[in-house]
Image (tube, rainbow, N blue to C red):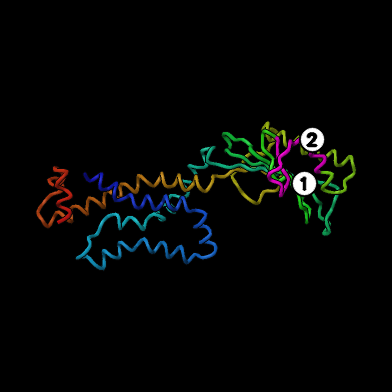
Amino acid sequence: MIWFRALLAMLPTLVGMLLILAMRPLLSTFYIYGPGWLIFLYLGTFLPLLINALAPKITRLHSWTILLPTAPIWLLVFANIGKAVAGGIPQCCTISTWKKFDTSKVDESGERIYFVLGGRGWGNPSSFEFTNASVIYAKRGRQFDLSYIYLPELRGHYTHSYTTNFDITREKLLEYVTKSDDFPPKEAEHIAQELWQALNELIEKTNLPDLEPYTNTEPLPRFHYRATDFSIVLATIMISVPFLYFLSLALTYFELRRRLAPRGETLTAASSNILSLPHYLRK
């Protein structure tokens, strides 16, 4: 039953990769504030292999101890393939678009102050949907904005009032624009109309720039997508599993041959009796 032993041998490594998937936020924090801890944790995966090397008479070298430290290596080797696979699945990607609306106001440096409409959701060029949006007045010291608008319901709330949702209408946008600065009435109405039209375009998915892979260098307006970190790591693990299994199979094969050879037994003979194989390995 070599195939079964190979599955058992790869199981700790697979569990290690799944733990990396589950602990992504924590590992990211360690990477930013204390990379030494990550190195320490990784070196800890060599402990079973080290015990095998230092105490060969007490313990035997197992294929799983060789495979365990390779958990992050598989993720690094197949990361780009996992990213490409995840990027091809709409449900594994997030989208965002940003569009600005200039006003007549300027800041202290002489730069034009503008409103920014942002839309977010899921998808890629084959299929996408906006699920929320926000409107921000890009002026220093602003204390309130339409920080979250649910789409297509058109309900939202202001910053710091997350429990108070209200219907988003053209009149509500006009009220928000008027409170944002001392705009002339005609300009406030024009900006509110532009924001209202842009919100409906997000819902209807019309009049949008081309959807491109994520970059942070494009000028506004921009429309991009990218696979989520969770989807990339999960896709990478799934791609790694067949290669991990074949390596585990090879290591298990040589491990069993090495143990049976001194007793003059062949792997075929030992495997012919499923119940006898554990008995051989305990000798």
Residue at the image position 14 percent from the left and 47 percent from the top = 276
Q: Is residue 69 magenta?
A: no
Secondary element at image label 1: strand
Tell me the quarter of the image containing the N terminus.
top left
- Mark 1, mark 2: which one is toward the viewer? 2
Residue assigned mark 2: 170
Residue at the image position 41 percent from the left and 61 percent from the top = 42
- Mark 1 nearby-residue class (10 Å; few <14, some 14–19, many ≥20): some
Residue placed farthest to the top in the image? 204
Residue at the image position 85 percent from the left and 50 percent from the top = 105
Q: Residue type at mark 1: give it.
A: Phe
Tell me the quarter of the image containing the C terminus.
bottom left
Residue at the image position 33 percent from the left and 49 percent from the top = 11
Residue 115 percent across, percent down from the top left: 77, 46
Could you tell which of marks 1 and 2 lies nearer the N-terminus? Answer: 1
Residue assigned mark 1: 115
- Is residue 183 toward the left or the right of residue 264 in the image? right
Gap between marks 1 and 2, in whole Å? 15 Å
